[in-house]
Image: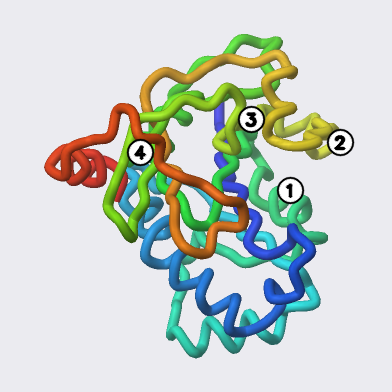
Amino acid sequence: MIRRIVIDIRFNNMGFQKERLTQPWIEHRLALFRDLTMRSLLRQVNQNFLVLLKYDPLSHDALQKALKALDLKLPKHFRFVPVDQFDEAILEYIKGADELYIARTDSDDLLHRTYINRLHHYKHKPETWALINQHGYYWDKDKNVMAETFYASPQFYVLIYSADEFSKGKRYVVRDHGHVIKFPHEKLPGRNWVNIVHSTNSSPKKVPEPNRLHPKDIQRVLVDFM
C-alpha cells in the first residue's frame, strides 16, 4: 500500500488585503516561511512528502522577484503552485499510489519532527475522512513566551482520500477549519504543532497566560519542532 502525503499551505491565495500581492509583503512572508515552517519541515525524520504552497496567480511576478531577492532556493519536494493548479499537482504526485493524505498547515507555523513519519504509518478507520490535531502550543517568537493550548478543530488537520477516488474528482467541502470536526474523524494524540504569534499575523493571537513554559522548556519544545 502506497500512501502519498501532501502538505497544503495557503501562501497568499486567501484574504482581501491588497498587500498580499505585493513584493514587500511576499518577501516578509517568505522570510517567515524560510526561518520557521520550511526549517521545521526539513527536519522531519521522514522526508517522503510534497509541499505545495498555493499562491494567487496575480502575484506570480512579485513572487518570483521576492524569491530572487531572498535567494531562496526550494528543495525539490517544495513547490509554489498557482491555486488553480493545486489539484493538478496532486494528481501528478499520486500516480501509482493507493492513498492520499492532505495535511494542512500555515506558512508560519511548525510541525513536530516526527509528524510526517507518523502519518505514513497511521492506520485510520475505513470510514474516516479527516485526522484532527487538537493539542499544540502557542509561541510568541518576539517575546519568547509559549504555552500549551487546545483547539477543538484547528487548521492542522489531514484529509484522507483513496488515490483512485481523488483522481475521479472526489473532494470534501471544507468551509473553514472549524468545520472539519463535523466530518467523520479521528484525533491524533500528542502535541503536534506550534502556532506562532508574531507582529504580522493575519488574525490577532495572544499566548494565553495560564500554563506558560519556562524558557528552558521552550527550548526543549523547539528542538522537537525545528
**Which mark is nearer the camera, 4 or 3?**
4
Q: Quadrant of residue 34?
A: bottom left
- Give how far across and how far down residue 220 sits, in percent: 17, 40
Cα–Cα span, label 2 and label 4? 32 Å
Q: How many marks?
A: 4
The dot on residue 168 is 2
Cα–Cα span, label 1 and label 4? 27 Å
**Amino acid type, residue under disc 4 in the picture:** His
Query: Where is the N terminus found, in terms of image quarters?
Result: top right
Q: Secondary structure at mark 2?
A: loop
- How crowded pointer 4 is (Cα within 10 Å; few <14, some 14-19, many 20+) is rated as many
Cα–Cα span, label 3 and label 1? 12 Å
Circles 2 and 3: CB distance less than 8 Å? no
Dot 4 or dot 3, earlier in sequence: 3
Q: Nearer the viewer, residue 78 or 215?
A: 215
Q: Which residue is mark 3?
A: 99
- Give how far across and how far down residue 10 sits, in percent: 65, 55
**Amino acid type, residue under disc 1 in the picture:** Leu
Q: Residue at position x 64%, y 34% from top? A: 100
Dot 2 or dot 3, earlier in sequence: 3
Q: Secondary structure at mark 4?
A: loop
